[in-house]
Image (cartoon, rainbow, N blue to C red):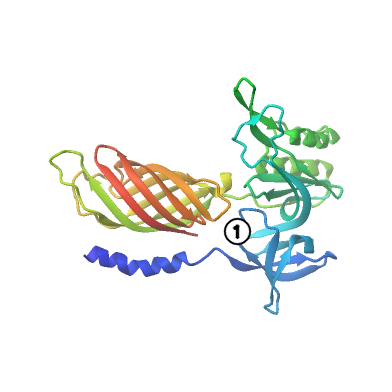
């Protein structure tokens, strides 16, 4: 009864935490149509997909919505975030489902559109620059800026189905020949096997500008692992499959720990360590690490803030588990975990909050 009362008291605290969204006005600027720099606060939304509009707040506290085609770009200059964006208008081709086979000889592109959007400067220099955008299907796309001309570095992969029903994955890596044109200009530059990744492309563009001594080189920050405090409440049921054991009733559970989101795959993979701080009533099978939980998991890409996920790991230092669940904005998490080994089984239902 006391444990149930404890959870009842904690619920309002967690509910208030869940209500907080990771959005705030941050100091920055935007470039109007004449490329004048206008100081304003930018409403930062932790964009998973490159935005086509932004909300600003003027020094007079007036709020406005600005579309990408109305301005030339914007930037955020706060203590935590420093990022600059340029307005681009490009024709984009999409492969919305790259793992679904396409008949041999048919185009894999199932959609084409010309849109305006904000792309982030990853390298900014006189000789050549690099920009990054994330499209509506969560695909990272890079753009090369040189002498005022902006070209998409093209890379797609998809599955081709041959007439005999065999399958193979094809990579359209046109970006390599596009980059080779840069390398041909500076024979002294020796960079091979450039992958279509932020780190590899930044390295090449920075080296290219350095060799040409093109002046100041400004490189955007490469995202690192995100660390989050993890707090959870829920219920647990543990039982033993021996016939002489009576099933145990559900017990309340409170966990606290840390979660580490990795930048690859748009922060959709993570590892975590936590501890069950609420003592369980049963005392058998005690272990040195009783209460310690380790997990590795991830979330499937989604165009909304709701995502389905999976996890594997160890509960209470003794019980291997496999689990599934849903998350909202990677912060509010509802997990269902089932102990798979040893014979003693465990069911966990946990509502958790992962805060920065």
Q: Crowdedness of circle 1 by 10 Å Cα count: few (<14), some, many (20+)?
A: few
- Image side of residue 212 versus residue 340, left or right: right
- 101 up-or-down from 52: above or below: above
The spot of residue 291 in percent (x, y) is 30, 50
Q: Is residue 78 shown above or below 212?
A: below
Residue at image point 79% right, 41% down: 208
Residue ID for mark 1? 46
Q: What residue appears at the point 20 percent right and 39 percent down from the top-left corner?
A: 241
Question: In the picture, residue 163 is in which quadrant?
Answer: top right
- Label count reads 1
- Residue drawn at the location 33% of the way across and 48% of the way down: 292
Q: Residue reaching furthest top?
A: 164
Between residues 218 and 143, which one lies in front from this camera angle?
A: 143
Q: Nearer the viewer, residue 247 or 153?
A: 247
Instruction: Name the foreground residue: 214 vs 38.
Output: 38
- Front in this rendered view, residue 46 or 303: 303
Tell whether 267 sits left or right of 90: left
Relative vertical location of residue 202 with respect to residue 3 in this rendering, above or below: above
Q: Residue at x 64, y 23 (%)?
A: 162
Displayed quadrant of residue 345: top left
> Residue 10 placed where, x, y %?
34, 67
Circle 1 SS class: loop
Farthest residue to the bottom: give it: 60
Is residue 218 shown to the viewer in this render? yes
Tell me the quadrant of the picture where the N terminus can be found.
bottom left
Residue 254 is at least partly visible in this image: no
Q: Position of residue 317 (x, y in %)?
A: 31, 44
Query: Residue 87's spot in the image, x, y percent?
Result: 77, 57
């Amino acid at each position: 009864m006391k444990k149930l009362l404890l959870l009842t008291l904690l619920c309002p605290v967690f509910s208030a935490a869940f209500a907080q969204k990771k959005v705030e006005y941050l100091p920055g600027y935007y470039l109007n149509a004449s490329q004048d720099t206008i100081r304003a606060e930018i409403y930062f939304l932790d964009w998973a997909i490159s935005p086509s509009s932004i909300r600003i707040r003027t020094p007079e506290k007036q709020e406005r919505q600005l579309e990408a085609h109305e301005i030339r770009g914007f930037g955020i200059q706060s203590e935590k975030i420093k990022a600059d964006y340029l307005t681009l208008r490009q024709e984009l081709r999409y492969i919305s489902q790259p793992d679904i086979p396409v008949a041999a000889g048919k185009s894999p592109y199932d959609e084409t559109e010309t849109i305006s959007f904000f792309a982030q400067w990853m390298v900014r220099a006189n000789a050549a620059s690099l920009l990054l955008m994330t499209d509506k299907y969560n695909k990272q796309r890079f753009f090369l800026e040189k002498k005022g001309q902006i070209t998409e570095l093209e890379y797609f992969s998809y599955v081709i189905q041959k007439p005999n029903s065999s399958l193979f994955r094809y990579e359209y890596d046109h970006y390599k020949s596009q980059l080779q044109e840069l390398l041909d200009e500076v024979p002294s530059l020796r960079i091979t096997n450039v992958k279509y990744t932020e780190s590899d492309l930044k390295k090449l563009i920075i080296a290219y500008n350095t060799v040409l001594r093109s002046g100041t080189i400004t490189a955007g920050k490469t995202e690192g692992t995100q660390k989050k405090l993890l707090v959870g409440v829920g219920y647990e049921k543990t039982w033993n499959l021996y016939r002489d054991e009576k099933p145990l009733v559900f017990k309340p559970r409170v966990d606290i720990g840390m979660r580490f989101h990795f930048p690859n795959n748009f922060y959709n993979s993570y590892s975590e360590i936590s501890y069950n701080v609420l003592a369980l009533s049963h005392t058998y099978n005690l272990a040195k690490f009783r209460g310690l939980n380790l997990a590795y998991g991830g979330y499937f890409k989604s165009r909304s803030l709701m995502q389905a996920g999976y996890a594997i790991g160890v509960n209470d230092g003794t019980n291997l588990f496999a689990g599934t669940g849903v998350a909202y904005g990677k912060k509010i998490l509802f997990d269902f975990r089932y102990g798979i080994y040893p014979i003693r089984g465990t069911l966990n239902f946990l509502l958790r909050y992962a805060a920065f």
